[in-house]
Amino acid sequence: MTTRIEIVDDEEEMCRTLAAGLRRLGYEPSWSTSPDDAFARVIAGEVDVVATDVRMRGMNGLELTERIVANRPDVPVIVMTAFGSVEAAVATIRAGAVDFLTKPLDADVLAVAIERADAHRRLRAEVKRLERAVEETRRFDELLGASAGMREVYSLIDRVAGSDTTVLVTGESGTGKELVARALHDRGPRRRGPFVAINCAAVPEALLESELFGHAKGAFTDAKERRAGLFADAHGGTLFLDEIGEMPVTMQAKLLRALETRRVRPVGATAEAAFDARIVAATHRDLESAVDEQRFREDLLYRLNVLQVELPPLRARGSDILLLAQHFLRRHAAKAERKVTSLSTAVAEKLLAYAWPGNVRELQNCMERAVALARYEEVVVEDLPPKIRDYARSNVLVAGDAPEELVSMEEVERRYALRVLEAVGGNKNSAARILGWDRKTLYRRLARWGGGAADGG
C-alpha cells in the first residue's frame, strides 16, 4: 500500500514542490497550509505520515505535533524548519516528532525521513497487534505463537492428542518441548491422570534405571525402602522423557524392552510389573545422526518416533518473537510489581534482528532482565543484554575484488556449509537437507574441513 503523506506548511509553493517530488518517488502526498485542516485529515484516518513546518500562522508545528501524538500516536510526525538549532531539535523530540529536518530540503531528503518514519509506524502497529494477540492465543496455555510453523504445531497437537500413541517432540534447546508434552497430556484421554517428567540428561547413569523402573528394598546400599519408579508413578497419565538423546546406550536397550512389553523390572526385583502410561519423549539432538554415529539405538528411535512434533526455532518464527516478548514482559513486570508495559520500536527491531540461539528460554531471560533494569514504562535498547544490543548477523563472505582475495569453490562450499550449520543450531540432519546432501556426505566433508568434532545434535 502506498504511504500517504500530509505536508503542512503555510508557504503554498513549498507544499506544491515537495508534493510533486514525493509523487514522482511513488508516494501519495497531500498538502495543506492550515494546521487545523491537516489535523482533521489525521483524525479521519486519511494520513500515514505527517511532515510539518514549525513556524506557521495560528497553530505552530510543535503544537500540531503534540496534538497528533496525543490523539493519533500511530501517525509519526516529521518536523521541517529553517531555524535549525540544538534547542529546536530538542523541542521537536519532546513534542513527540520522530525526525527533524532543516530547510532548505528537497523531496529526496524528505523521502529518506519518510521511509524511517513509515518503518517506525509499521513496527509500532505490529507491536500493538501482537500485544492484542497475546490475549488471543491462550488456547495452548504457555505455548504461544501465531506463525505458520506454530499453527502447524497446534494442528498436529490437536490431531495427535486424542490417541495413546508414543510421540517424539523435537526441536532446539529452549523451544518449549515440555510445553508440547503438557499440551498433549492436557488434551488427551489421560488428562485426569498424572503428568510425570524426567530430564534424562540430569540423572546420573547409575541412578537412571532405578529412577525410571524403581527398585526393590535392599537392591543397593541406599535402597532402604522399595520404590515404584516413574513408570509406575505415571500410571493412568503421561510419562515425559526429556532429553532422550542423552540416555546411555546400555539404558536404551532396557527402555526399548519396557516400551515393547509395557512392563518394567525394578532394580533388584525378580518379577516384572505392568505399567499404563502414555510415553512422550523429547530431544534437541538429531537422533538419525546419532544412530549413524552409534550413539542411539535405531530400533528405539523407531519405537519412539511413531508420531513426531517438530518445534521451529525462535529465529524462524518471525513476529512471534515480539508476541512472546510482550507476554514475558507482562509476566515479569507483574511478578516484580513494576509498571513496565511496552517495548520501544528500537527494542522491537533489535529483538527481530537477533538470532536467538537460546530460543524462547533466552528471550524470557532477556525480558526478565529488561524489566529489572527498566527506568521507564517502555523498555529501551539500553535495557537489553549487550550481545542483543550489539548483534550483527554473520554473512558468508565469498571474495573481494582483488585477485589475491579470490577463493576456491571448495572454500566457498565450506563457508556456506558452516553458515547453514550455524543457522540450524548445529543440527546436521537439517543442514544436510538444506544443502541437498545425505548425512554421510556432510560428515565426510566436515571431517575433511576439521569440523567433524561438532556434536550431532
Image (cartoon, rainbow, N blue to C red):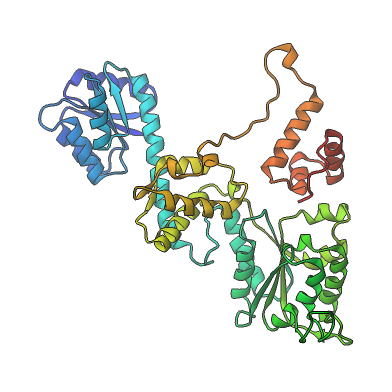
The spot of residue 155 in percent (x, y) is 60, 63
Q: Is residue 264 left or right of residue 394?
A: right
Residue at x-position 81% and y-position 66%: 205
Residue drawn 26% across the image and 18% down it: 103
Q: Quadrant of residue 297?
A: bottom right
Looking at the rendered image, the quarter that the N terminus falls into is: top left
Q: In the rendering, at what x and y percent does residue 173 appear?
A: 66, 55
Give how far across and how far down residue 406 sits, in percent. Answer: 74, 17
Q: Is residue 179 left or right of residue 57?
A: right
* Residue 181 in sight here: yes
Q: Residue at x 74, y 82 (%)?
A: 232
Q: Is residue 115 above or below residue 429?
A: above
**Is 255 situated above or below 150?**
below
Going by the picture, which residue comes out furthest to the top?
403
Judge left or right: residue 218 versus residue 43.
right
Residue 55 in the image: state x and y as whole percent. 16, 25
Q: Nearer the viewer, residue 220 or 281?
A: 220
